[in-house]
Image (cartoon, rainbow, N blue to C red):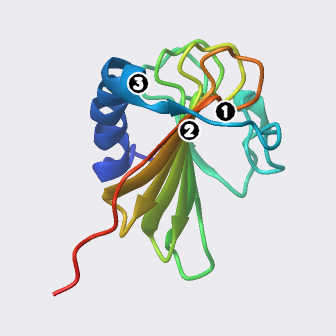
Amino acid sequence: MMAPVRGLGIGFASLFLAVIVIGGAWAQPAESQFPREPREDQFFDVSRYDEEWMTDDRNEDGLVDYAVRLTDELQKDREAVDFNHDGMMDDFYFYSNEVLQRQEIDTNYDGAIDLWVFLREGVYVERYERDTSYDGYPDVVKEYGQPKEE
């Protein structure tokens, strides 16, 4: 087992989730274009994290609740966290060159993603999509303006 990697993504997630839940009422509904299906490397079941992943049992209950996968260059590629310790991963982080690009969250712990957060430069929220009806389709999309160029 390894020590959990603490970073901007995990702490940021909790704060951002609170902002989205509170501020979601102001976002505009969007037309659903396609259902969001879990990708091949996005496992809710903690037993599926194999030797490709470094894992940890942070609360020592015998179940994996943190997993990270590194690239060949030893940079973060993917992370998964079981925040409520129910044996199902509920937060997924996707990196490129160790910069957080996207976070996907199962906010109601039903085993399906219902919040997608897209980031720029690892810290600026470009857009988020929410599935408030929990049918697998985003029905709220909030986009933020582009940065001012000098």
Q: Secondary structure at mark 2?
A: strand
Q: Secondary structure at mark 1?
A: loop
Between residue 122 and residue 135, name the one nearer to us. Answer: 135
Q: Could you say which disc has been placed on residue 138 in the image?
A: 1
Between residue 147 and residue 84, name the one nearer to us. Answer: 147
Give residue 139's quadrant in the image: top right
Give the x, y percent position of residue 105: 55, 32
Give the x, y percent position of residue 131: 63, 25
Compare marks 3 and 2 and give the one earlier in the sequence: 3
Task: List the residue tagged with mark 3.
Answer: 24
Give the x, y percent position of residue 128: 49, 43
Q: Could you say which disc has been placed on residue 129 in the image?
A: 2
Disc 3 residue type (three-letter)? Gly
Circle 1 residues within 10 Å: few <14, some 14–19, many ≥20 = many
Estimate the spatial distance between the alpha carbons at disc 2 and disc 1, rounded to whole Å. 6 Å
Estimate the spatial distance between the alpha carbons at disc 3 and disc 1, rounded to whole Å. 12 Å
Give the x, y percent position of residue 53: 65, 53
Compare marks 2 and 1 and give the one earlier in the sequence: 2
Estimate the spatial distance between the alpha carbons at disc 3 and disc 2, rounded to whole Å. 10 Å
